[in-house]
Amino acid sequence: MTLDTPVADDIRNQLAQMRRSYGDEGLTEASLPTSPLDLFTSWLQDATANPYIVEPNAMVLSTSDITSRSVLLKDLNNSRFSFFTNYNSRKSKAIAKDPQACLLFPWYAMERQVIVIGQALKVSEEISDQYFASRPYGSQIGAWASAQSERINNREELELNFKKFSDQYPEGSKVPRPSYWGGFEVKAESIEFWQGRYSRLHDRIRYVRDLASGQESDQWSWMRLNP
Ligand SMILES: Cc1cc2nc3c(=O)[nH]c(=O)nc-3n(C[C@H](O)[C@H](O)[C@H](O)COP(=O)(O)O)c2cc1C
């Protein structure tokens, strides 16, 4: 029988004691806009201006197969949050089975978190083409070279693949978009804003799309949740 590797006691004690007090800047009912997208874009601007947040547009995407990973928000069109990836990857297979998805923006340096829930749909071929064409050459070849989420024997194999595709599509020539690479957009059904406050009395406001007036409705209602 093999036992799990024990973790040093001092690390375990440190974990139990790690805590921060949060500030006093809160979310007041009077300050809430009618649309959560207005609040989201204002928080995204704050995150972008904050020097302690290295990738303000990074979000943790969770899928129905109970896995999560970071992806980059590349567009926000009305309430549709877009990211780009490999359509054969683990996340894409999960989305094909069940499109329900969750996006979490972990803006810890601002004591803020936003959670978006909705269905992920592929964007049009034109949008994927357009975005692919705007990527740096190395990223374009990288998309060809990587069978994302598949097992690979060693790093050398990956580098050889990169070399193979950079020979096929030399720098300066137009690199076509691989058919298995493109975007998804998550159409928000709910957006929850979390702002850290003193004594763990955090502010949580969840906006929910009002489905009574149809799937395409842009009417939202909000509620305050216990922290
Ligand atoms: C900050 C950050 C941003 C990332 N952005 C993307 C992205 O936009 N698209 C993507 O496919 N993978 C991105 N990745 C890699 C993914 O987290 C993940 O490793 C990869 O997509 C494979 O996930 P899967 O096997 O669950 O499909 C990013 C990773 C980090 C740490």
Image (cartoon, helix red, strand yellow):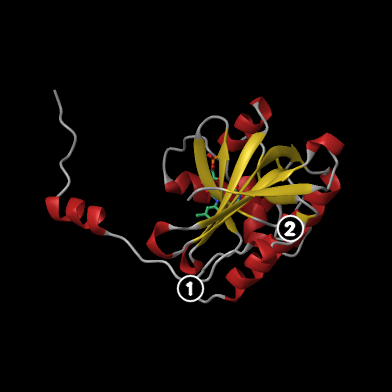
Which residue is pictured at 60% across the width and 30% down the height? Answer: 94
Which residue is pictured at 55% across the width and 66% down the height? Answer: 26
Residue 45 at x, y = what percent? 66, 70
Whichever of callouts 1 and 2 sits on the residue coming sooner in the sequence is 2
Image-based side of 6 in relation to 170, left or right: left
Residue 93 at x, y = what percent? 62, 30
Residue 205 at x, y = what percent? 60, 53
How far apart in space, not on screen, are marks 1 and 2 (Cα)?
23 Å
Residue type marked 2: Leu
Image-based side of 131 in relation to 31, left or right: right
Residue placed most toward the observer, 209 or 203: 203
Q: Please give the label number shown on residue 37.
A: 2
Residue hosting label 1: 52
Residue type marked 1: Tyr
The crowding category of the residue bearing disc 1, from other C-alpha atoms within 10 Å (few below 14, some 14 to 19, many at least 20), is few
Residue placed most toward the observer, 135 or 226: 226
> Mark 1 against mark 2, which lies toward the viewer?
2
Does residue 83 lie above or below 18 as drawn? Answer: above
Residue placed most toward the observer, 69 or 19: 19
Secondary structure of residue under mark 1 = loop
